[in-house]
Image: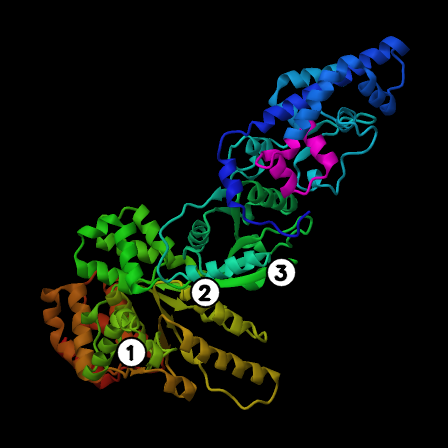
Amino acid sequence: MSSAISIDRARLERRERQPHPILGLVVQLVAHRARRRLTWLDALHRERGPGAIDEPDAEHDFYAEHEPLAPINQRIAELERIVGDAQANPLHDIATLFGLTPTEIDLLMTCIAPTLEPAVAELYGRLHGHRYATEPLAARLFGWGRRPMWSPAGGLATWALIQAVDAGPGQARPLLVDPHLFACMQGEFGVDAELVGVASLIPARSPLDSWPLASICARIETSLEHQQPLRVVVVGPEACGRRSFAAAVAQRLDVRALAIDCDDIDDDHWPAAYVRVIRLALISGVIPVWYGERIDRRWPKSIPPTSLQFVICEDPSKLRPQAGVVDERVVIPSPSLDERRMLWRMMVPSSAAWPDETRERLAARHRLTVGDIAEIGRRLPSDAGSAARHAREQTRGRLGELGQLLDCPFDWDDLVLADKLRETLEDFTFEASERAVFWEAPEPRRLFPRGTGLVALLTGPPGTGKTMAAQVVAAELELDLFRINLATVISKYIGETAKNLDRIFSRAARMNAVLLFDEADALFSKRTEVKDSHDRYANTDTNYLLQLLEDYQGIALLASNKKNNIDAAFIRRIRYVLDFARPDGKQRWTIWRRILGELLGAESLRPLEPAVAVLAETVDISGAQIKNSVLAAMFVARRRREPLSIEHLISGIDRELGKEGRAINDRERERLRRNG
């Protein structure tokens, strides 16, 4: 048996032609041998009676001495010479590919013949009372006497080319040729019945320019030349085109790629399924492409590996080594902006009717994979808005329990900020929208190799608009906003926090979203003096987080109420630091009027305007506290079945200030009532 399986393009071409005529000669050969043995058995029973012992040596002598058998002997010898000398035939291919011994070849022909020709099955029935082949029958037909022809370690058993059926105690086991092998020998390509729903050919599609096809094909050719089995490990996120990459490589090698879903194979059936896949690769000249979560299984050693196979995965550390096989890792790059433009035009045909700037915005802002864009195309979006919604939905679930999706109902008019802060926030948003185009140029990438992500630190007291600002940014960018759930990130167990952070950033890298780390000082706190192992590991988590932030290519917002608690190294490395102060009197007046005006309408707000002016001037509360006060006042008024008045607003403010142990003093309260 050979040490590795080679790609044979000529064999693939032969398999796709009509059945080779050599199979008809095999039928003739077996039929002549069966008739000759019938002649011997008839003579034996006539001369010595029905109970005579069927001796192999006597049978051999009979064939040589019985003159009427001379034409049959001559024809058998002629057929054996033709079958044995013919190189371009399926029987020779099978014997060579699977390392069959002469006895196994004879046994295989004995099993093939009745499958091809029912008349041979009739002859078997006359010979031993059954229409199927058995090992003793094959041994006597082909002159092996009582020698065993079937071995569990032989090629026929190892490769499951012949199935031995249990016939009960003392009975010779029926031997049946595998239906898939039989179909392939007849020139038909197909997948084993046991692999239906598990394995399928991958259609070849146009590859992306950024895919490293040339380099990997050169590496494969070198391995084939040196007969070194190679396993190409294609690494990348789901739907990034990993299987299409494998199919593109196979196409360049003039063969086809066969995808095998390991998740659909039970552990008990894994060894047998592996054998059938490799056998199919041998017979049909396809390249196996393994994928799924269950690639972590042990790779069977019962058969030699193919000279080339692919494994698709996200985390190559799960992949077990395969004896005698060299792994070549290929990381599928994210599509460039030009490639995303091309994919939108090709896979979402309706986008051709959209304005160029709209299509450009979709390509630039949504870092989608090949599969993501293809899925959007299958959903047939009616307009750019639908396409943008589908783009967000494609990646929305990838954070799982690690993040909470926030609604983003606010726009720039809802933010009441100091002019300088607002301008900085607008600069950040503009950079977020334009960065895809900027970082496509080689010069910025060379000068800032780790600077493609965008991070901002939002600091300030509670309720000053940090979360609302994040919502406005996400809405402006038409991206989802995810608030990271710190409870699922920070762990008291050593090393777990770093693992959780890695999960967040690795998943977020495959999403079209803005990350909001609320109460970020819990994650980005100052490093401490090392007094014990917990301090050392806490500092390690902090350092690791710094590295993750530098490598992250997306948009992240870090919100904190305690800027002084944040490690200075973070602040130095973050280009945008936005300080949200408590609103002054003028800003509070604007917030009061906007909230009440939207809830009540301009007509109902007018009588409250003087009191609102006093509220804004005298009561120092944040924007969030103003919103909560108005909300409480609205329900107080509704419970009393009264129109909203200053008394209701005072009740709402009292409730908010009470949380801090504060209250409106009597003089301010009286002043409010006079103006209300």
Is 652 left or right of 31, judged from the image as shown?
left
Q: Which of marks 3 and 1 is nearer the N terminus?
A: 3
Q: How far apart are marks 1 and 2 (CA)?
A: 25 Å
Residue placed at 76% from the left, 38% from the top? Answer: 151
Is 157 left or right of 206, judged from the image as shown?
right
User: Which numbered dot is residue 644?
Assistant: none
Write down the region rendered in magenta: 83-110
Q: Name the residue under label 1.
A: 464
Q: Identity of the amino acid at label 3?
A: Pro
Name the spot of residue 207 as percent of width and height, x first.
37, 55
From where the camera sits, is residue 49 visible? no
Q: Are the two marked residues, 3 and 2, in contact with CB atoms closer than 8 angstroms? A: no
Position above or below: 45 against 145: above
| Element class at badge 2 | helix
Q: Look at discs 1 and 2 and give the one toward the viewer.
A: 2
- The answer to which quarter of the image holds residue 455 is bottom left
